[in-house]
Amino acid sequence: MKQFDLYELANRVSGITEVVGNFFAEAAQVCLELNGHQSGVEVLLEGIYEESIRLEWERELNKETLLSWKDEKEATEYGATAIALLLVLHFGNYEFAERSPQFALGDYYLKSAPLENTDNRDEAFLEISGIFKVNKGNTISIRVGQKKKQLKNKPIKEETVLIAVIEFSTPQAKIVKL
C-alpha cells in the first residue's frame, strides 16, 4: 500500500505554491479528523486507479485551525482539492497543475513531463468535488454522475477530462475519465 504525506503537495508540484499546498492539505486534515480519522488512515481508490493508499500527516490541529475552517463546505472543497491533486499527480504522473479559470473544462489543467524521446506531454483537465459525509442522497456515484452531466454541456473535443470525487467520512476517492 502506497503512503502519501498530505502536506507534500506544498513542495512537489509546479504551479502550486507552498502556501496554497499547505492551505489545501490543512483543509483535508480538518475534514478527515472531524470525521474521526487520524494520520495513517486508509483511503480506498476506485475508478481508473483501483487500490488503497495511506494518508499521513504530522501536524496537530489546534483551536485556531478549527476556527479557521468552520465553514464545512469550504473545507470540503479545498480538502478534496488536496487529495485529488495528490492522487492524479502520483498515479497519472503529472508534474504541473494550473488553476483553470471558471467555466473551463475542469478546476485544474495538468501536464506531465515530456514523454520518453519526444516533446509530447500527457495533458488533462481535472474536475474536483468533495463530500464531507456521505449519505443516501449524496454518494460518490451520485456526485460523479452530476459532474458528468455538468461537463456534458461544455465543448469537449479531444481533451482528456478527469473527474475526482473525494469523500471524507469513509474515506474514499473515485477518479474517472470522461
Image (tube, grey):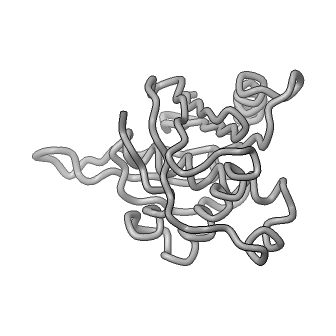
Residue farthest along the left direction in this orientation: 117
Percent position of residue 18, x then y: 49, 76
Residue toward you, 162 or 2: 2
Q: Residue at x 72, y 58 (%)?
A: 102
The C terminus, quarter of image: top right
Where residue 175 sits: x, y (%)? 55, 32
- How many marks the image carries: the answer is 0
Q: Position of residue 104 (x, y in %)?
A: 65, 51
Quadrant housing residue 166: top right
Q: Is residue 150 visible?
A: yes
Image side of residue 68 versus residue 10, left or right: right
Q: Please indicate whether residue 154 sits to the left or right of residue 97 in the image.
A: right
Q: Is residue 177 visible?
A: no
Q: What residue lies at 65% left-to-right and 45% top-to-bottom?
A: 37
**On screen, residue 134 above or below 58:** above
- Residue at coordinates 38% horizontally, 39% vertically from top-left? 91
Give x and y (percent) for residue 92.
38, 40
Q: Quadrant of the N terminus?
A: top left
Closer to us: 17 or 133: 133
Q: Which residue corresponds to the image point at 36% horizontal and 39% vertical from the top-left?
A: 2
In the rendered view, tell whether residue 20 sits above or below residue 37.
below
